[in-house]
Image (tube, rainbow, N blue to C red):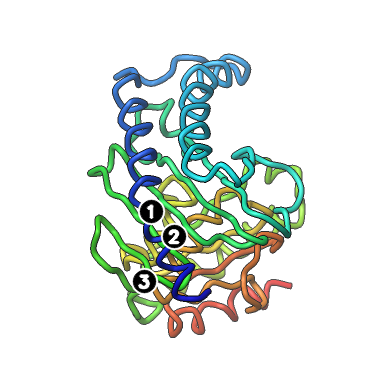
Amino acid sequence: MGDIEVRELRTLLPAVEAAVREVGARLAERRPAEPCQEFGLAGAMARFAAFDDPAAAELRARLGVLRPEAGLLEDEFDGAVPAGGEWWLCDAMDGAVQFLLGLPQWAVTATLVRDGAAVLAVVHAPQLGARTYRAVRGGGAELDGRPIAAVERESAAAVAGTSQPPGVAADPVALRRAGASLSAVAGSVLAVRNLGPTSLQVAQVGSGHLGLFWEFGADAANLLPGALVAAEAGAAVTDAAGAAWTPAADAILAAAPGLHGQVLPLLRDLD
């Protein structure tokens, strides 16, 4: 993008962050201290909707005012990211399972997608020190207002994050590759963890809190914001074959370039 576009998006960024933070603060205030006691899926989903629906509506409305010309994508949209135009993608509760269980690992995200690619992203974790990642394509990435950069490590000293997309059980190829990749990567890194929201874990690669993150399966809605943060922080963000990651990819690997080169063969060789 040109300098003018970067400046325009950076001007928009504080207002997007304010909207995300305020929605997150209200959710944190409303959340019960005790874990959700619903044992059935229907009850848990109803509980989730009671929190998520009003928060998502508020976030969409506020983003719509900031960029009225942009359309709105649902946070769990089906199909491809539109190849043309501008679209807001927001998630008031990435990490819904943790939210309902009373755990702090959840996030509120907002992403502006232009012509099929993320150009602005905010990832805010209200109950993890209220930390906020933000990025503009071509303009770098920040954590709590400070520039960040992915950290190079030997794979043996790296902590890896991973997760599974919603509905992965219905994708036998992704399910098989997820299992095989865990065995492949776990023997080559210090530790493998699933630390909650996908968007937050990918962003944490950009700040060096995680050495790398990988996942198999289509998960564009959850990956787009963190992938922009990681890429703008200097991480290599690709699919499992080493091609540049896109929302249509069926896998992602994000890591500092040197570490990425160490881990990529482990995932590429699964096929």
Q: Position of residue 268 (x, y in %)?
A: 66, 76
Q: Earlier in the sequence, mark 1 or mark 3?
A: 1
Q: Find out whether the residues at labels 1 and 3 contact each other: C-beta distance under 8 Å.
A: no
For the residue pair 162 and 129, the one nearer the viewer reads as 129
Left or right: residue 263 versus residue 245 is left
In this rendering, is residue 156 above or below 204? below
Residue at 27%, 68% in the rendered image: 147
Residue in the foreground of this view, choosing between 198 and 1: 1
SS under mark 2: helix
**Disc number lying in front (1 or 3):** 1
Q: CA distance from mark 3 to mark 2?
A: 33 Å
- Residue 188 falls left or right of residue 241: left
Of the pair 113 and 266, the residue shown nearer to us: 113
Occupied quadrant, residue 196: top left
Mark 1 neighbour class, 10 Å CA radius: few under 14, some 14 to 19, many 20 or more: some
Instruction: Report the residue marked by disc 3.
Output: 158
Instruction: Tell me, for residue 13, which label it has, or none.
Output: 1
Specify the quadrant that holds the C terminus: bottom right
Residue at position x 38%, y 61% in the image: 10
Element on which disc 1 rests: helix
Which disc, if any, is residue 9? 2
Identify the residue shown where x is 38% and y is 67%: 206
Circles 2 and 1: CB distance less than 8 Å?
yes
- Amino acid on which disc 2 is placed: Leu
Alpha-carbon span between mark 2 and mark 1: 6 Å
Q: Secondary structure at mark 3?
A: loop
